[in-house]
Image: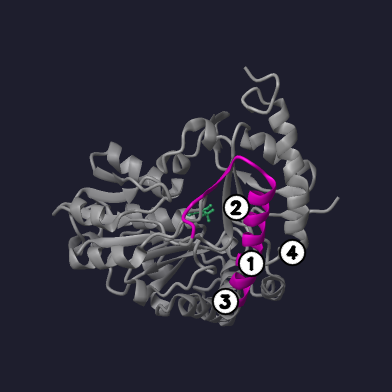
Amino acid sequence: MRKTYLDNNATTPLHPEVKKVIVGSLEIFGNASSEHFFGQEARKAVEDARKRVAELLNAKPDEIIFTSCGSESNNLVIKGVTCQDLSCKALEESHPGKHIITSQIEHPSVMNPIKSLERQGFKVTWLPVDKYGLVDPALIEKAITKQTVLISVMTANNEIGTIEPVAEIAKIARKREVYFHTDAVQAVGKLKIDVRELGVDFLSLSGHKLHAPKGVAALYIREGVKVCPVLQGGHQERGLRGGTENTLGILALGKACELALRERESNVKEIWRLRERLREGILAKIPEVIVNGHPEKVLPTTLSVTFRYIEGESILLRLSSKGIAVSTGSACSSGTLEPSHVLLAIGMPHELAHGTIRFSLGIENTQEDIDYTLEVLPGVIQELREMSPLWPGNKRAC
Ligand code: PLP
């Protein structure tokens, strides 16, 4: 069966050059903290990789901390900035306030630690978004108080792809002397990310979203910004993240960042062309669909589409049986199918949110993948609609 992978926002396949680096680095087994030759070999490799990550972001190598995943990077910022441990050295100089500003469409790895702080007594402003998923920077300016310790707004949304006005928000945050974090897990490698131009204090990225393996990620922390460690242990990562470095993963991430710097522009051009082919094909061939997210300020890799009158889960399973991998706009947790908080936040009613599919493209996709999807999808939608009592074209409709 032909296999078409259109779920790159969930995770990406390894880049062939990253695979080579992984194989090559299997022999580098030393502990990067050891002073002997084996350790120094690992240390040099880790520091080279740090330089490559920094180059991609226009940061300094010392501003990059390696972590295990994007979720850990997000947790480190949120818990590290709001740390209440008075013995923590970083706290002396950090903001003592208990107010956080974030959006209603963040990834759970931002929302859940913030909800946890809310339960512990922090005040949280959950910013609404417009119908495209855009945050209004003016609302942020209004929400800031003397107590505001952190603003966290994602660079681009993982479900609908909308790109947020991060530079504008950073300007406001800087003027009002509030730390600003952006979760750029879906944006790095797809958008030009220059931390100096953006003016952010923290930025999260994750290896497996840019063709490196799972289990490695990074956090940019602007020089001079204080944060308490969450994973306490040894002195690794400037004392901000205990634990022996994942040398193999870090080297792979370094290579993925080097490739992203070199290939991003040409990759993105082609991916956007394929995305537009898919979007136009769906609109031409299938009635009663809604394309979600901002029409222009959107990730080139992401196409979120709502198919009225049917369930996204059924579409996903049928496409999967025909070799096409996509994801729904719903998060299935602990056996209950909840509609996506992102789709609800853009004002979509529950029943439409349930009929949403996210197609997410990557460097491995070809025009044949898109044409195959456009060949299969209309039939799948038609079949499901014919079974749906909600479909007006169905004679059985009540
Ligand atoms: N932030 C965003 C926007 C994401 O899309 C994801 C993963 O889907 C994460 C954070 C978490 O990244 P990780 O899977 O590396 O923990």
Q: Where is residue 258 in the image (x, y as percent from the top left)?
A: 57, 78
State the image coordinates of residue 154 (x, y, percent, origin top left). Answer: 40, 57
Q: Is the magenta stretch mostly helix, strand or loop?
A: helix
Q: Earlier in the sequence, mark 2 or mark 3?
A: 2
Q: Give the range drawn in magenta.
A: 266-295
Image mark count:
4
Which of labels 1 and 3 is toward the front?
A: 1
Which residue corresponds to the image point at 56% horizontal and 65% vertical from the top-left?
246
Q: Residue 10 carries which label?
A: 2
Under circle 1, the secondary element is helix
> Which residue carries the number 1 mark?
273
User: Among all residues in the image, which is located at the extreme right?
Assistant: 1
- N-terminal-most mark, 2 or 4: 2
Between 18 and 313, the one lying in front of the other is 313
Q: Mark 3 points at which residue?
A: 265
The picture quadrant where one finds residue 289 is: top right
Give the mark, 1 or 4, whose residue is nearer the N terminus: 1
Disc 2 residue lies near ligand 1 with CB under 8 A: yes
Amino acid type of the residue tagged 3 in the rendering: Glu
Query: Residue at (50%, 75%) from the top-left corner?
Result: 53
Mark sitting earlier along the chain (1/2): 2
* For discs 2 and 3, the disc positioned in front in the rendered view: 3
* Colour setting: one colour
